[in-house]
Amino acid sequence: MEPSFLSPEPCAAWARHEFFCSEETVTTAQTHCRQCGTCCRKGGPALHRDDLELIRQGHFSHHQLMTLRRGEPAFSPVDGRLEPTRRELVKINGHGREWVCLFFQPKTARCAIYAHRPLECRLLKCWAPEALLAVVEQDTITRRDLLNPNDPVLELIALHDQQCPAEAVAEAVADWRQKPDESRHRAALVDLVRRDLAVRHHALTEFGLPPAVEFFVFGRPLFKLLGGYGVTTSEAAGTVELRWPGE
Ligand code: SF4
């Protein structure tokens, strides 16, 4: 089933989001954007209420977005380290498996939607980050801001959040890290990964969710989140295996 999105044309995106250029590339004398593309290569922006109009106008849509569920590990530009997100965020997706913003054009180092770029991109000045830091996690939007209130996909989202909440992953990883020899901790994580995959499979095969919007509807698969904690996941013959580095 096609979700009934609020945008004019339905279907027609921090494990690592560093907004700023590395110290080597920012000089104290810098006063303008040199269009080096460093910020865009490090990830697309999280979206705010100010950006809803851009979506309504069709400058980008759900298949170009991804969700970071509350509790997912993400790079905090405020604290400068990987930590669980305090709230759900929707952001511009990345290219393939990379975090490079979907709209970044590597050959020209230009933004494909520059005239209609989201709020965080408009505020970002790597030589003067205060304006951007002031809005981080302020007035951001969630999936529900981009779906009709009666859309049945909301039931799938609720089921997914209930079956495998992102916060539970962080807790299960911490338990397993403390006591790596206790198989129940590994088993708890495997269970979460399997539940995540089961809801996604149901949504794609029985509900008919378009694959292009999977990351918007459910965020990244849990096995990908585990990679951010250093845990390797493999699946063979219906069995999920998790390993710490060196195991
Ligand atoms: S939307 Fe444009 S300006 Fe913003 S991160 Fe992507 S490519 Fe860069």
Image (tube, rainbow, N blue to C red):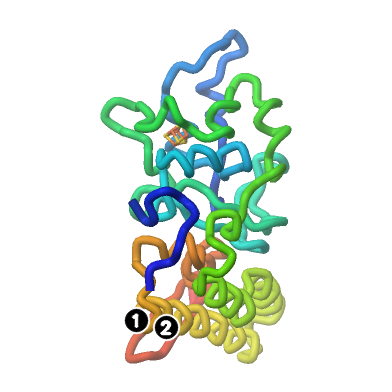
Q: In terms of depth relative to the viewer, which is nearer, 243 or 204?
A: 204
Rendered view: 89 above or below 59: below
Task: Tell me the residue at 47%/32% (across/down).
Answer: 117
CB at mark 2 closer than 8 A to ligand 1?
no
Q: Identify residue for label 1.
A: 205
Rendered view: 197 above or below 20: below
Q: Secondary structure at mark 2?
A: helix
Q: Is any part of residue 14 visible from this angle? A: yes
Q: Identify residue for label 2.
A: 202
Q: Is residue 204 left or right of residue 164?
A: left
Please give the count of numbered marks on the rendered protein: 2
Quadrant location of residue 84?
bottom right
Residue type at mark 2: give it.
His
Q: In terms of depth relative to the viewer, which is nearer, 143 or 232?
A: 143
> Residue 75: percent from the left, percent from the top?
61, 48
Residue 175, numbered label? none
Task: Tell me the residue at 37%/51% (across/down).
Answer: 9
Callout 1 touching callout 2 (CB < 8 Å): yes
Q: Is residue 170 left or right of residue 228?
A: right
Q: In terms of depth relative to the viewer, which is nearer, 228 or 131?
A: 131
> Residue 201: percent from the left, percent from the top?
40, 81
The image quadrant where one finds ligand 1 is: top left
- As measured in the structure, the alpha-carbon distance from the residue carrying label 1 to the one carrying label 2 is 5 Å
Task: Tell me the residue at 35%/26% (across/down).
Answer: 110
> Residue 93: percent from the left, percent from the top?
44, 50
Neighbor class of circle 2 (other Cα within 10 Å; few <14, some 14-19, many 20+) is few
Residue type at mark 1: give it.
Thr
Task: Tell me the residue at 54%/55% (across/down).
Answer: 146
Q: Quadrant of the N terminus?
A: bottom left
